[in-house]
Image (tube, rainbow, N blue to C red):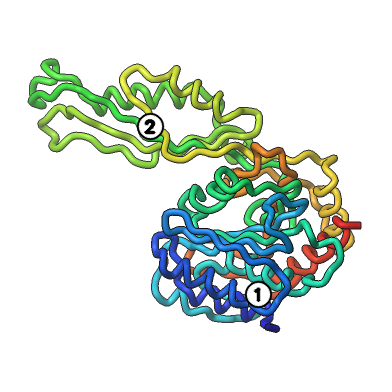
Amino acid sequence: MSLTIQALTEQLISIPSVSSDFQQCKKAIDFVEKLFDDTSYTIQRFEQNEVYSLIISRKQELDFDLLFFGHLDVVPGKDELFQPKVKENWIYGRGAADMKGACAAMIRLFLDVEHLENMQSCALVLTTDEEVGGDNGIGFLTREKGLRAGTVFNPDGGAVLQPSLSQKGMFQFRLEAQGKSAHGSRPWQGSSAVALLLEDWNRIYSCFELASESEQNKVSLNLGRIEGGKAANSVPENAYALIDLRFPPTYSLSEIESMIAACLRHSTLTRLTSGDPVHVTESDRSYGILQSILREQGYEPTGVHNNTGSDARWFSEQGSSILLMLPKSTNGHIDEEAADIDGLNELHLIMQSFVQRFYQ
């Protein structure tokens, strides 16, 4: 099938594959699988807790030299965002930037390089739960099915045609405190769970040297939600908070957990979602190949450090060379989300050059 990257992107956007809508996510996987019906690839389909994933390669084994991967799920949006529109060479719609446009470029890549020599250990992996943590997609495939890769190319991080040197790890957790209820006019007869919770929060906040606009490659903390109490004249008996912490590769996940645990006096901690940081060295062979290609295209890659996370973190514990880079696009998750059509075509050509040089 000879669909262009633009046409593929538009068709993918028109499928409202919000992470929580398992049937629409399945529909997106069905659509991609059908594109490869008449090819020589081996198509492997997986399902875990109603989350569908697809692996397209030349073999049954799941240990690859080179792996491209992306996600077809998106965050919720207005109905009109799932009706793609093209304006001044930009495709607008939910997922255009995050990351159906890049997935379309990878799909087109694999259709184009089907008969390229040395493709026996190269794969395309597409999942449908990145926006909600990736546990049943890439997490399931790496931990339960043995998916491995020496080099991973994920166009879902870094900056526009600027590969990332690192991407922060993530630790999202819930704190819960128990107090003692009392009438608000006699607070000494009780113990405020909210106050106890905030004491622990303040200790956590003071424990780290935190990121700022000028120094972003440090720990960031966000108290995303706090809830407790029922009325102004009642001492709250229970309270909880939801916290998002991002950390650079100078920390390990276990270090972060230990540091937080040491701050707690009144609260119990429940881990919600976590992941290791992503890091690649400038001397890495795959990173060097990508840099060379970008320089030949007139770009000057300097290496960036990302605040956000992605499913690439699932490959960190394998020691994979992880390449993160974005095509020209807006931010994701916004009403005016869009991807530049020429930028998607350029990403395709860069990835095609990368495949050819990787196997030289």
Residue 60 in percent (x, y) is at: 68, 58
Task: For marks 2 and 1, give the one nearer the viewer.
Answer: 1
N-term-proximal mark, 2 vs 1: 1
State which quarter of the image contains the N terminus.
bottom right
Instruction: Name the residue tied to disc 2.
Output: 270
Q: Is residue 92 visible?
A: no
Q: Mark 1 points at which residue?
A: 36
Q: Which residue is farthest bottom?
A: 2
Circle 1 residues within 10 Å: few <14, some 14–19, many ≥20: some
Label total for image: 2
Q: Can residue 281 be seen in this view?
A: yes
Picture disc at residue 2: none
x 82%, y 54%: residue: 290
Query: Residue 7 placed where, x, y %?
Result: 62, 81
| Disc 1 residue type (three-letter) | Phe
Above or below: residue 2 compared with residue 131: below
Q: In the displayed structure, does residue 336 sit left or right of residue 295?
A: left
